[in-house]
Image (spheres, grey):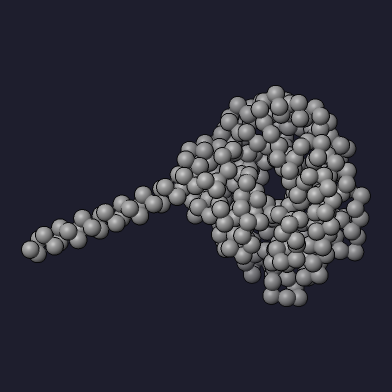
Amino acid sequence: MQNSRRKFLRQSGLMAAAIMLSDRLTTLAANPALPKKIGLQLFTLREQLAKDPAATLAKVAGIGYQEVETFYDWSADKGKFWGLTPKALNALLQQHHLSTPSGHYQLNDYLTKGNGKADALQPQIDLAAALGQQYFIVPVLPLGLWDKKLTSADYGFMASQLNKAGELCKKANLKIGYHNHYWEFKQLSDVKKTGYDVLLKETDPSLVSFELDLFWAVKSGKDPVTLFKEAPGRFVAWHVKDMDKKNTASLTAPENANKTSMQLLSGVSFAEVGTGSIDFHKIFAEAKLAGVKHLFVEQDKITIDPYTSITKSYQYVKNVLLK
């Protein structure tokens, strides 16, 4: 009787473990909330695009990527992407069966309190619309604010400006979004909040979305899933990039408070997706909560052949995270 009872308990335990594992795998394997297409943020290949955009995009498509996210320098690019007009770029993308649902556009003056100049806004909205993009993404905190001690008023101004820009984007069938780095997760100088807290609270969800850079969120000591819970459905796109296992310390830690942005950024190191320290399984399991519609692989600095790098990342996303 004793042996039978032990056997029953042992078998029951094994069965329970098997069920739990099966549920976990099923959640990851058949999550209908996850996007089916894998995209690439083209900033990853900025040097290659500057030399030969046609050959670069052909290689991106050949690896298997189906979407690309553009980037644009308002001060230098003069209405073109790597020398290509929106019409020419669209033709090239179509040739390689690529689409561009999203692009990064700079609004440094417009988002800076005390400035607010909107000169760059409408022309860039027109560029995004000409490419047929859905999302007009602000990629970074205004450069002049990187090393300032920002207050809730600074971010409140940004939120208000994003709402206004959101109205203009809406008229062009676009939605504005904000892409984070680490600055937004620093404590503000006047209140016990972060800049990101202010942006989430004071932007209109019907007008403003967020593109969560998973690397920079984690590198700032934030759990992406916690952010999803705070603002469900607002994270329409993710930047999927991994962190060097030997370099995981938070940039917002107290010991970094007096370091300049360039000091901190120069010490950051990345990894191909799946080879670093970020727990993507945990994050991808919450796709529905986040509201994600687009996934863009990105790697700011690459230490191996760039095409080998983006191939490794693509294969991990496709064969592991979306399997």
Q: Position of residue 266 (x, y in %)?
A: 68, 52
Q: Is residue 249 visible?
A: no
Q: Position of residue 316 (x, y in %)?
A: 51, 40
Locate the N terminus and report the quarter of the image it occupies: bottom left
Tell me the residue at 55%/52% (across/down). 287
Q: Is residue 24 above or below residue 249?
A: above
| Residue at the image position 64 percent from the left and 39 percent from the top | 40
**Position of residue 94 in the picture relative to residue 287 (left or right):** right
The residue most toward the left is 1
Please name whichever residue, 231 or 47, is drawn nearer the observer in this view of the structure: 231
Residue sitting at x 59%, y 38%? 37
- Percent position of residue 278, x then y: 53, 52
Along the viewing direction, whichever of 123 and 189 lies nearer the viewer? 123
Q: Residue at x 55, y 46 (%)?
A: 34
Q: Eyeballing the image, is 132 above or below 115?
A: above
The spot of residue 87 in percent (x, y) is 81, 29
Q: Is residue 288 left or right of residue 148?
A: left
Q: Quadrant of residue 130?
A: top right
Question: 216 or 318, which lies in front?
Answer: 318
Q: How many marks?
A: 0
In front of the other: 110 or 76: 110
In the image, farthest residue toward the bottom: 191
In the displayed structure, 108 sits above or below 173; it is below
